[in-house]
Every structure is written in C-alpha cells, then in structure tokens.
Image (tube, rainbow, N blue to C red):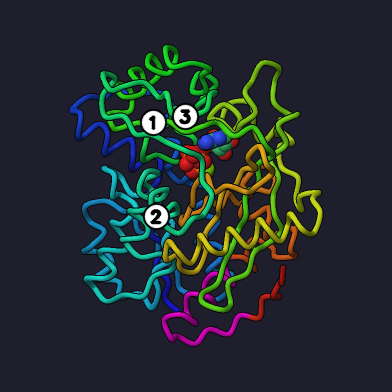
C-alpha cells in the first residue's frame, strides 16, 4: 500500500509561530509540547517501509492539501495534531474528506469535540458518564467557583500533553483559583476550565477497533509515589516533560495496573462507553480517575494518542500495546488493519489480538 503519514512536527510548529507572530524569538518548550519529534515521525515511516509499504511523510502545513492530492495515497496514517487554533486536530481529516482519501482515526467532528474539554464533558454528562464537576471561565471577572468541591484544577480548555497543567494549577480556595484563572487566561489565550480535583487513583486506557470489535489494551496506572515531594498527585507538564527523561525515566507507569478484576472491568466498561459516545474511530487513549467513592470518572479522551517509539520514553499507548505483546511495528500494523477494515480496504497483517 501507499501510506502517507500526516504529522505536525515541532519544527513546523516553531516555523508557524514565527510566521504568525512575525518574530524570531520563540517561547519555551511547553508551547510546542504537542508537536511530533523527528524521532517519532521517522520511526513511523521506517516501520511502514519495513512492513513493505510505500511511505511518504506530509507535514500538516499550507502545502498539505496539494501534497495529499498529488501523492494519492491508499491510506493516510494521521498522527497530526495540527498547527493553529482550537480545531487544529481536524485539519488533516478535513483535507482527506475533501480529497476522498481514507485515513486512520477519528473524523473532524470527534477530533474537534475531544480537544475541547468543556464540550467533551457536556456530552459525557448527557449520557451520565461520570466526569469531574466543572465550570468554564472566559474572564477572571466571573463569579468564583463556589459550587465546586475544593481543591480544584485550572486547565486551558483546548490543549493536550499537559500544556498549562502544572503544580500551580491545583488550588485550595476561590481566591487562589481566581488568580490562577487570570494567569492561565492570559498565558494560553483561551477559556479555562476549572474542575473538582479528584484525588483517587489514575489510569489511562488504550483502546482500538470499531463497533463490536473495540478492545481495551492492558490498563496503565499512573504511580504518583514517583513524583517529587510537594508535587500534587497528577500527571502534570513537569511529570511528563521535566522530571522525566530517557536517561532518567520517571517510573510512573504500572502496566498492567495492579487492580482487581471488578475495577478493571468498571474502567474498561466506562472507557468503552465514552469511546462509542464520542464517536471515536480506530484508536484512542482515555484518561480516567477514581472519585472519593471509587467510581471511575473520565478526565478526557485522546483520539490522537502519542506514540513515542523508544520504550525508554514514557508513552502510554505503545507501553500498553507492548504489555499486550505488540511490538511498535505490530502496533502500527494493527492500527492500519483496523482502519483498512473500517474503510473496506483489504490489509493482511496478522498482528496478535489481545482480548481484555
Ligand atoms: N479533574 C481532575 N482531577 C484530578 N486530576 C486531574 C483532573 N484533571 C486533570 N488532572 C490531572 O492532570 C493530568 C493532565 O490533565 P489532562 O489529561 O486533562 O490534560 P491533557 O493536556 O489533555 O493531557 P494529555 O497529555 O493526556 O493530552 C491528568 O492526567 C491528571 O493527572
Ligand atoms: Mg490527559
């Protein structure tokens, strides 16, 4: 098959930033946290080549439409989180829709909804899926968050990779909340969402498949004991990108999670419901946390899960897939098989099937 890998590189994000702001100086690493590293892009392309596919990389920039149109791939493997705006993750899928090209993963609507934490939670709430209580702030003049149970966490409404989620994001009272809300509104130039902070155990579930065939891979538990003293128990920006490095990895994942069968089943069941309700296709990673009663709550859905190739780097989807017996290339192969099956393309990759 001819497969185009659509990505948004860190380099591309930096170029876009310079062009838009008309300045050379760039902000710190956090600003570009969502971008794909060259290492990941190359690993995906090399994996496809080794599998015998033709592979071509396409940056999700202004030329993407032209390139996709000229290349006419059989399938677009979409890992692109896009360059600008709150609908950036929908960009490549929109181009594929226009060009009538099959692509992996969710459609533009689902990607747009899942990037917006407020809309995601509204939909989950409609279907009575547990998710932390929340309030959205468009300015810091609005009433403080009295109806929420403290502590609360203040997050930008449409970011990923824990951008804007640091140790200062969790606060114990409305006065502190007001000041962090003001700070985040200014810094991230978007509304902020304030949620009751759940202090129970945290899990993330990698799922893949469609319809009746959706499967959960082994659950990953986030181990907060590994965090430095004084850190709030959460998988913050610091925990993902500062305190963790390939040469000194933070042992923050336990996979499979050491939980009993009942909790395992409850987590998988709520994750699958959220997957169906949000209209996820092919694959997704879903973040879940237990509330005071031990009930699994959905924090958010990641329909474009990170797939860092190096097992020494913490990356939940590949970690969970490895635990189920899938190498990196098995994982990519299975994703392609799942997408091909959905769109009616034949693809004979015999990756083992893990059943939860
Ligand atoms: N309401 C909450 N209660 C408790 N912890 C929370 C809550 N919201 C977020 N967190 C913590 O902050 C982390 C990051 O939050 P969230 O998953 O919403 O951010 P993100 O930037 O979308 O993450 P990702 O890297 O998965 O895209 C969570 O993994 C969790 O540890
Ligand atoms: Mg998350």
* In the foreground, 294 or 279: 294
Can the viewer see residue 149 in this picture?
Answer: yes
Q: Nearer the viewer, mark 2 or mark 3?
A: 3
- The label shown at residue 148 is 3
Q: Mark 3: give few (<14), some (14-19) or many (20+) Cα within 10 Å.
A: some
User: Which quadrant is the C terminus positioned in?
Assistant: bottom right
Cα–Cα span, label 2 and label 3: 19 Å
For residue 293, side relative to residue 214 (left or right):
right
Q: Earlier in the sequence, mark 1 or mark 2?
A: 1
| Residue at horizontal 74 percent and vertical 36 percent from the top | 251
Q: Find the magenta span and give its range.
A: 332-349
Q: Is residue 209 above or below residue 28?
A: below
Q: Nearer the viewer, mark 1 or mark 2?
A: 2
Q: Position of residue 165 (x, y in %)?
A: 48, 29
Front in this rendered view, residue 82 or 200 = 200
228 up-or-down from 122: above or below: above
* Identity of the residue drawn at 43% across and 36% down: 134
Q: Residue 234 magenta-drawn?
A: no
Residue named by callout 1: 31
Specify which label sits upstream in the sequence, 2 or 3.
2
SS at mark 1 in the image: helix
Which picture quadrant has residue 191?
top left
Task: Please state if 98 lies on the left or on the right of 108 as rendered.
Answer: left
The quadrant of the image that shows the N terminus is bottom left
Nearer the N terminus, badge 3 or badge 1? 1
Query: Alpha carbon of mark 1 to alpha carbon of mark 2: how far?
Result: 28 Å
């Amino acid at each position: 098959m001819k497969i185009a890998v659509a990505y948004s590189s860190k380099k591309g994000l930096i170029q876009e930033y310079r062009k838009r702001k008309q300045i050379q100086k760039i902000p710190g690493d956090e600003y570009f946290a969502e971008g794909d590293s060259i290492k990941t892009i190359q690993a995906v392309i090399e994996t496809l080549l080794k599998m015998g596919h033709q592979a071509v990389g396409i940056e999700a920039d202004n030329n993407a439409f032209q390139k996709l149109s000229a290349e006419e791939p059989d399938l677009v493997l979409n890992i692109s989180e896009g360059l600008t705006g709150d609908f950036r993750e929908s960009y490549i899928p929109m181009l594929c829709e226009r060009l009538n090209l099959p692509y992996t993963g969710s459609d533009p609507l689902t990607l747009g909804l899942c990037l917006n934490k407020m809309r995601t939670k509204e939909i989950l709430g409609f279907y009575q899926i547990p998710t932390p209580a929340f309030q959205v702030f468009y300015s810091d003049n609005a009433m403080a968050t009295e109806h929420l149970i403290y502590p609360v966490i203040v997050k930008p409404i449409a970011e990923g990779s824990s951008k804007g989620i640091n140790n200062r994001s969790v606060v114990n009272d409305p006065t502190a909340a007001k000041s962090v809300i003001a700070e985040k509104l200014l810094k991230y130039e978007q509304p902020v969402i304030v949620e009751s902070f759940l202090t129970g155990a945290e899990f993330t579930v990698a799922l893949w498949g469609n319809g009746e065939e959706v499967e959960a891979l082994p659950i990953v538990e986030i181990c907060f004991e590994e965090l430095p003293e004084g850190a709030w128990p959460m998988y913050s920006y610091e925990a993902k990108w500062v305190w963790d490095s390939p040469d000194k990895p933070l042992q923050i994942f336990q996979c499979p999670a050491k939980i009993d069968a009942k909790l395992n089943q409850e987590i998988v069941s709520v994750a699958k419901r959220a997957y169906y309700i949000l209209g996820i296709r092919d694959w997704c990673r879903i973040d879940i946390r237990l509330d005071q009663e031990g009930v699994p709550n959905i924090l958010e859905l990641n329909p474009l899960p990170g797939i860092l190739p190096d097992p020494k780097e913490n990356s939940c989807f590949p970690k969970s897939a490895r635990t189920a017996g899938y190498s990196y290339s098995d994982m990519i192969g299975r994703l392609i098989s799942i997408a091909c099956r959905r769109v009616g393309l034949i693809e004979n990759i015999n990756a083992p099937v893990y059943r939860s």
